[in-house]
Image (spheres, coloured by chain):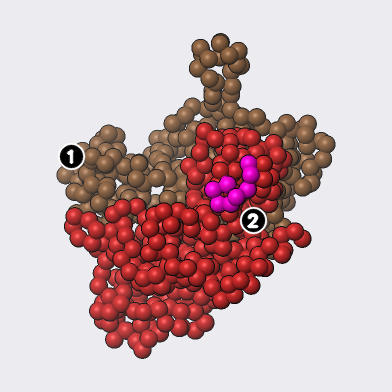
Amino acid sequence: MMMQPAPAPAAVAKPAAPALEVSRLTVEFPTRRGVLTAIDDVSLRIEPGEILGVVGESGAGKSITGLAVLGLLEAPGRIAGGEIRVGGRRIDTLGEVELTKVRGREMGAIFQDPMTALNPLFTIGAQLVETIRLHSCLSREGARERALQLLREVGIPAASERLDQYPHQFSGGMRQRVVIALALAAEPGLIIADEPTTALDVSIQAQITALLRRLCDTRNTGIMLVTHDMGVIAETADRVAVMYSGRVIETGRVEDVIHDARHPYTKGLMAAIPSLHERVDRLAQIDGAMPRLNARPDGCAFNPRCPMAGPRCRREKPALTPAGRNAAACFLHQGGTE
Amino acid sequence: MISAEPILSVTHVSKQFDVSAPWLNRVLERKPKLFVNAVNDISFSIPRGSCLSIVGESGCGKSTVARLVTGLNSASSGEIRFGRGSGGRPVRVQMIFQDPHSSLNPRWRVGDIIAEPIREMKLRATEAETHQRVEELLHTVGLAADDMRKYAHEFSGGQRQRISIARALASEPELLVCDEPTSALDVSVQAQILNLMRRLQEEFGLTYLFISHDLSVVRHMSDTIAVMYLGRIVEMAPAEALFRAPQHPYSRLLLGTIPDIHAPRRDRALQAGEPPSPLNPPTGCTFHPRCPIATEHCKRIVPDLQTRAGAQVACLNL
C-alpha cells in the first residue's frame, strides 16, 4: 500500500516523456583496419512501467546498446550518431561529470554477474548507504533506514542482519537481489538489465524475473531487459526488439513476435528453440552464423543465411516498417526482394 | 538398435572431494577436515543406442558424474561397468566439453587435433590413411576438408563444437559423454549441433550420456532423464513420462519454473528457496527445506529410489 502513491507524482509531472527514447543510434569502434559499426541506426522506446526485451544472439549488439545508453562504452567505442533521451532529457551529449549524476539517479544498471558488480571488501549496507547518499541528501541513519527498506522490497529475508554482511556471504540469487536494490537506490525511471538471470539457476531465475516484473509494475519504472533467452522475455517483457548484426530487425508485442514473427530470422529463431511440449525428430535450424563485425555482407546482414533472400537483399538495407502487428526490417513486407 | 545389455552401468557410486583448508591452517585454526559429497550413491544404466540425460542445477553433481564415467576422477565407492563394444573389446568412451574455446588446443591445426586420437590409438596404419579419416570426419560433422589446415580461433563457436565432436568420433567410440555441449552456443547454432548429434546417433548407433541444465534441450535429446539434487538422483523416468507427469516435488519445481515461450506463466506463484550448500546439506531428504509436502519424517530419513508409475522416485510422501 505504501508503494502505490510513490510513482504517481513523477508520472504526473512528465506525462508524455518515455522512460527511454533512443533514435537512430549508431555506435562505432575505430580500429587500425577501419571503422567497425557495432550499432547501426537503432531506435527504441520504453514507456514508464514497461519492460522492453532486447533479444539477440552473441554479437548482435544488444549489450553495446545498453552500455551506450548508460554512457559506459569503452574506448575506442563511440556514439557516432543519433540521440538518447532518458525521461525526456538528452543525455548522449552530456560530459562525463554531468553523466555521472544522471547515471544512478535517472537510470540504474543490473549486470550479468552479481559477484563482480559488488565490492567484496565492503558490507552490503555500506555499499547501499554510499549509493543512496550520493543521490540524495539523507543522513547516514536515514540512508541506512532506506537501505533496509530496499532490501526488504527486493525480498531479502532477515534484512537487518544481512545489511552488515559481505557479498561472499550471499548466494548468487540473493546477490542479484542486492544488485537490484542498488540499482533502485535512487528511484530511477529507467533500469538497464543486461542478462540479469543468465548466471543463475532456473528456479532462482524465475524469482528474479518475477521481482523485476513486480518492481516495474509498482514503481512505474521502465526496464530494458537485455537477454539471449527468449523464455525470459516471454515471461517478463511487454514488448520485444529482436537484434541481428547491430540492427533491430523486428519489434512488437511479445506474443505477436513469438507467434506471428514476420522477419525470417525471428521465425527461424523461434523454430530453433526446442519445445517443452513435443519432441520433433529434427529442429529447425538456421545454417551459418552471425557475420563478424568486419565481415558484414552488403544489404541486409541476414541475406546469406536467409531462405527467402533475393537480389534486392544483397543491394539495399531494409528499414524497419510495419508488418502485420509488428514492425520488421525485411523486403518481404516492403514490396518484394527482386 | 537398443539391446538388453547396457553399455554402461553405474551402481551405488559416490564421490567425495576433500575441500579442507591446507594442513597448517587446519592445525593452527583447529579446523576439522571438510568433505563434499558431490555424488551420493547413484545408480543408473544406459541401454545401447539410447540417450540418458542428467539434469539439475549448478552444484548438484551432474558434471562430476560425467567425469567419473570418463575416468577423469575416480569414484570413492561403487562400481562403473562398461559393456562390450564391437569385436568384443571394451566400450570406447569419449567426452564433449561445454566450452569449445578452451577444449581445443589453440596452437594445433584442426587436422592434428582430430588426428591425435587416431595416431595415439594406432587406428590407422599410415599417415595417408589418417589424413583420409580426418577428412571423412570433418565431412561427417559438416566442415570442409581444407579446414584441416586452420587453427581453432578461425572458427565460430558452433564450428568449434563441430571440431570437438569430430575429435570425439575419431576413436570410433560407442559411448559419448556430453557435458553441457550446447550451453555456450546461441539458439540457432544450438539447433545445428543438436540436429548433428541426433543424426550421428542414428548413423553410428552411438549411446549418449548427456549432461545439461536446459530442460528443453534434454527433452529433445533423451530417452530417459535423471533429475539430480545435491548429489542424489531424486527421479529417473522416461523423458515423455517425466514431462507429462513429474512426480518428485523437485522435478515439479524444476519443470514449473522453466520459462516456456509457448505458454508463458506470468502470474505464477513464486517458488521460494534456493539450493543449500553441498558443504552443509540438510539432514534426511536434502530437499525437505524447500519441499511443499515435507513432513517430520523427511528431516530424518533419506528416501531411496522406488519404482512408482513407470518411474523411479526418491520421496517418502508419494
Q: Which residue is mark 2?
A: A211
Q: Is residue B275 left or right of residue A331?
A: right
* Towards the viewer: A77 or A196: A77
How crowded pointer 2 is (Cα within 10 Å; few <14, some 14-19, many 20+) is rated as some
Which is nearer the eye, B92 or A166? A166
Residue that lies at the very extreme toward the right in this rendered image: B296
Query: Which type of secondary structure does the marked residue at label 1 adopt?
Result: loop
Q: Quadrant of residue A243?
A: bottom left
Q: Which residue occupies the foreground of this view, B3 or B184?
A: B184
Spatial CA distance of label 1 from label 2 is 62 Å
Instruction: Tell me where residue A283 appears, x and y as whole percent.
Output: 46, 64
Residue A259 visible in rendering: no
Q: Is residue A139 magenta?
A: yes
Q: Label 1 is placed on what type of residue? A: Thr
Pointer 2 chain: A
Disc 1: which residue: B126
Badges 1 and 2, same chain: no
Quadrant housing residue A22: bottom left
Q: What colour is chain B?
A: brown
Q: Which residues are magenta?
A: A133-140
Q: Which chain is red?
A: A
Q: Which amino acid type is shown beneath numbered disc 2?
A: Leu
